[in-house]
Amino acid sequence: MDKAAELKNLSDQLVKNIQTEQSKQYLEWLQKWDCFLVNHMSNQTLSSNSELKTLVRQGIPHTYRSRVWKSLVQIIVANAQSEFGKNYYSCLLGRNSERLKNPASDPCLRQIDLDLLRTLPTNIHFINADSEKMNQLKRVLYSFRFHNKTVGYCQGMNRIVAVALLYLKEDDAFWFLVAVVEYLQPPEYYTPTLKGAVIDQKVLTDIVQEKVPKVWNHLKQLGVDLSIFTLPWFLTIFVDSVNQNLYLHIFDVFLLEGNKVIFRFAIALLKIIEPKLLECHTIGAIQSCLSNLSDLKLEAKELAKVAFGIHSFSIKTIESRRQMYANSQH
């Protein structure tokens, strides 16, 4: 019966997708992307402007995601690519070929190997340890360890690379990871202490208190530490926390606008599930609600509408609070 219910849900989703793709709104959306890419993408390089921002907030069509993600990443890492040279990724693999054969000698590489099969366990590309995508994932993570010895490897990075590999070639997925860790996320996000990410949880708590006060008061009364649930949202950009359609849309916007959008989507999710959270009267019930967001029946555009409908959400406020919490740790 469970299998029948699962197949019924899949069937309903496929029918819904077909109906969506035949709708007038969907075709108009595709047409807008067609026009934009024809007019603004020369020599495979995307021109960043307000029109692109509006389009990306509405989501990137599956057909164009590879092309747009690659171009957004290139905008971010262009200087680094110039500095390190055209074939930097393959050189990293070549220079460290001996270490690749003996990962047991390196704690980072050992941890990568342990995490590989935990990456996207329900995705067909990452179920088999010997699959092509799994080998690409391993090589990209190993290479980043050699590239950035300060960070090396942090749990969560495997999911970021896996998502990149759904749409990008192996060397582009490496630069995707560089863009996320070294440019889009604040410093010390992926260090052993997770200092940057932990500070952002404190900033988020402040924003929750302002933007979703009923939820904040309710969690406070129950003695729930929200950061236990939200820390993975920030480290993996919601992978494993919400369904694939939602986190891919979040990645679309994140690649263009950076870390600040994680706050917006976090608040939007809490606003959407607020009625459910307020009905929870035990820590266990809250845990169940916040741990099962992947079952949330929610369209990506609905989530984005809530996220970008939140007013007075300045990056200056986020930065000043980060600084305040960073200073308080000294």
Image (cartoon, rainbow, N blue to C red):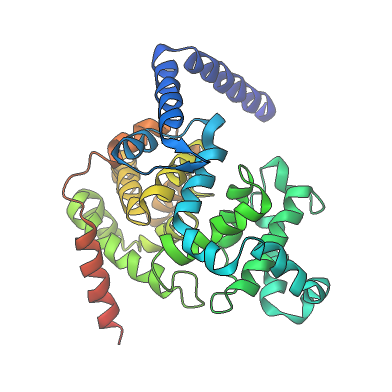
Residue 322 pos. (x, y %): 27, 70
Determine the residue positioned at 59% across, 74% down: 152
Q: Is residue 243 visible?
A: no
Residue 193 pos. (x, y %): 47, 78
On-image quarter of the C terminus = bottom left
On-image quarter of the N terminus = top right
Looking at the rendering, which quadrant does residue 149 occupy? bottom right
> In terms of depth relative to the viewer, which is nearer, 128 or 88?
88
Q: What is the number of callouts on the image?
A: 0
Residue 135 pos. (x, y %): 76, 55
> In terms of depth relative to the viewer, which is nearer, 189 or 80?
80
| As drawn, 105 above or below 226 | below
Determine the residue positioned at 49% across, 70% down: 190
Residue 153 pos. (x, y %): 60, 71
Q: Is residue 56 visible?
A: yes
Position of 237 with respect to 117 (left or right) is left
| As drawn, 17 above or below 43 | above
Residue at the bottom extreme of this rendering: 330
Position of 2 with respect to 271 (left or right) is right
Residue at the front extreme of this rendering: 43
> In terms of depth relative to the viewer, which is nearer, 154 or 212?
154
Position of 13 with respect to 260 (left or right) is right
Position of 222 with respect to 137 (left or right) is left
Looking at the rendering, which quadrant does residue 184 occupy? bottom left
